[in-house]
Image (tube, rainbow, N blue to C red):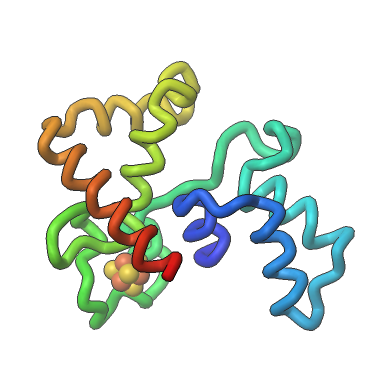
């Protein structure tokens, strides 16, 4: 869930994510892995397996695990030096797909939360997301 989420939020090409899982997991069998990755994880099957992308911020990871204990980042924060990369990328994802999700019954509340952010907050998130992507693509 965590690696798929990170790839989805970053905007990695879904087929590359599928190929990566096939390459790194010795027990990855394509007929199982492909629909799970392209469908459930990356929302790249035209909505056949899921009605919305499976996205979450760092706050969800904090709630569902103990990963965040002791982490230098704060899952509550989307921008600034202590911003959690998952939370930054989550809001950047919502902002990038605002027009697509605006009428989606389950994602509209998050779009409204994005729209409630001040323009300078949105810009800071978008700037930091671009920086993260640049760092990760080196
Ligand atoms: S706070 Fe740290 S451990 Fe928690 S989701 Fe963000 S980067 Fe991961």
List the single residue furthest toward the top: 103
Residue 89 lies, in percent from the top left, at: 35, 52
- In which quadrant of the rendered image does the C terminus lie? bottom left
* Percent x, y of residue 79: 18, 54
Question: Front-most of 22 and 54?
Answer: 22
Q: Is residue 36 left or right of residue 29?
A: left
Q: Is residue 44 left or right of residue 120?
A: right
Q: Residue 137 in the image: x percent, y percent?
A: 45, 65
Q: Quadrant of ligand 1?
A: bottom left
Occupied quadrant, residue 91: top left
At 38% from the left and 58% from the top, the residue drawn is 133
Q: Residue at x 26, y 31 (%)?
A: 113
Which residue is located at x 27 percent, y 63 percent?
84
Residue 50 location, quadrant:
top right
Task: From this view, report whether residue 8 is shown above or below residue 91.
Answer: below
Q: Quadrant of the N terminus?
A: bottom right
Q: Position of residue 64 (x, y in %)?
A: 42, 65
Q: Residue at x 78, y 51 (%)?
A: 35
Relative to 52, residue 78 above or below: below
- Examine the rendered structure and indicate whether residue 96 appears above or below residue 3: above
- In the rendered image, the residue lying farthest to the right is 31
Q: Quadrant of residue 98?
A: top left
């Amino acid at each position: 869930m965590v690696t798929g989420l990170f790839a989805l939020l970053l905007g990695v090409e879904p087929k590359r994510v599928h190929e990566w899982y096939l390459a790194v997991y010795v027990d990855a069998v394509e007929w199982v892995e492909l629909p799970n990755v392209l469908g459930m994880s990356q929302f790249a099957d035209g909505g056949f397996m899921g009605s919305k992308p499976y996205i979450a911020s760092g706050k969800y990871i904090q709630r569902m695990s103990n990963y965040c204990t002791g982490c230098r980042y704060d899952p509550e924060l989307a921008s600034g030096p202590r911003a959690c990369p998952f939370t930054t990328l989550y809001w950047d994802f919502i902002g990038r797909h605002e027009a697509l999700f605006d009428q989606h019954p389950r994602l509209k509340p998050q779009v409204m939360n994005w729209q409630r952010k001040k323009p300078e907050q949105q810009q800071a998130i978008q700037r930091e997301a671009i920086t993260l992507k640049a760092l990760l693509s080196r």
